[in-house]
Amino acid sequence: MSQVTTHVLDAAFGTPAVGVGVTLDRQTHDGWSEVGGGATDADGRISALGPDRLPDGVYRLVFATGDYFDATRRPAFYPEVQIAFRVSGTEHYHVPLLLSPFAYSTYRGS
């Protein structure tokens, strides 16, 4: 399993958000470098998002929320959502996104 996983829930519909594109990037001295990615499945999850073990550092998840809302024919305020966080050690990091067309929230899950 990837050291970082995510899932996306559509709060407006009360269902998993299917087909949301997500990239996992690592911050380097030259900017950001992609280390993984995928699209949410029928449960709104991506379990194979990146490597099983990541070097310590700052990472971000970039969610293609604009594409998702376009596909569901709804206007939305945020064309993408970026969540930056720090990885340290071998712990698992689950970073969920609760999404609606005009708001979002996140937290460190388990």
Image (cartoon, rainbow, N blue to C red):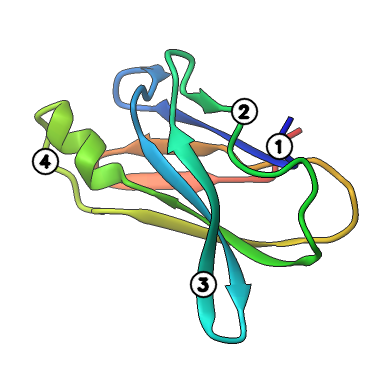
Residue kind at label 1, given as amino acid type: Ser
The foreground one among 4 and 103 is: 4
Q: Are marks 3 and 4 in contact (CB under 8 Å)?
A: no
Q: Quadrant of residue 86?
A: bottom right
- Residue at (16%, 26%) from the top-left corner? 72
Regarding mark 3 in the picture, which secondary structure is present there? Answer: strand
- As measured in the structure, the alpha-carbon distance from the residue carrying label 1 to the one carrying label 3 is 19 Å
Relative image position of residue 77 (x, y in whole percent): 20, 52
User: Which class describes the residues within 10 Å of circle 4: few (<14), some (14-19), or many (20+)?
Assistant: few
- As measured in the structure, the alpha-carbon distance from the residue carrying label 2 to the one carrying label 1 is 6 Å
The residue that label 4 is drawn on is 75
- As measured in the structure, the alpha-carbon distance from the residue carrying label 1 to the one carrying label 4 is 32 Å
Tag 4 or tag 3, which sits nearer the N-term? Answer: 3
Return the mark for residue 32: 3
Comparing labels 2 and 4, the label whose residue is closer to the camera: 2
Residue kind at label 3, given as amino acid type: Trp
Return the mark for residue 2: 1
User: Which class describes the residues within 10 Å of circle 1: few (<14), some (14-19), or many (20+)?
Assistant: some
- As measured in the structure, the alpha-carbon distance from the residue carrying label 2 to the one carrying label 4 is 28 Å
Tag 4 or tag 1, which sits nearer the N-term? Answer: 1
Q: Are marks 1 and 3 in contact (CB under 8 Å)?
A: no
Residue kind at label 2, given as amino acid type: Ser
Q: Is residue 34 left or right of residue 28?
A: left
Regarding mark 4 in the picture, which secondary structure is present there? Answer: loop
For the N terminus, the image quarter is top right
Tag 1 or tag 2, which sits nearer the N-term? Answer: 1
Comparing labels 3 and 4, the label whose residue is closer to the camera: 3
User: Which class describes the residues within 10 Å of circle 3: few (<14), some (14-19), or many (20+)?
Assistant: some
The residue that label 2 is drawn on is 47
Relative image position of residue 28 (x, y in whole percent): 61, 78
- Residue at (31%, 54%) from the top-left corner? 80
Q: Are marks 2 and 1 in contact (CB under 8 Å)?
A: yes
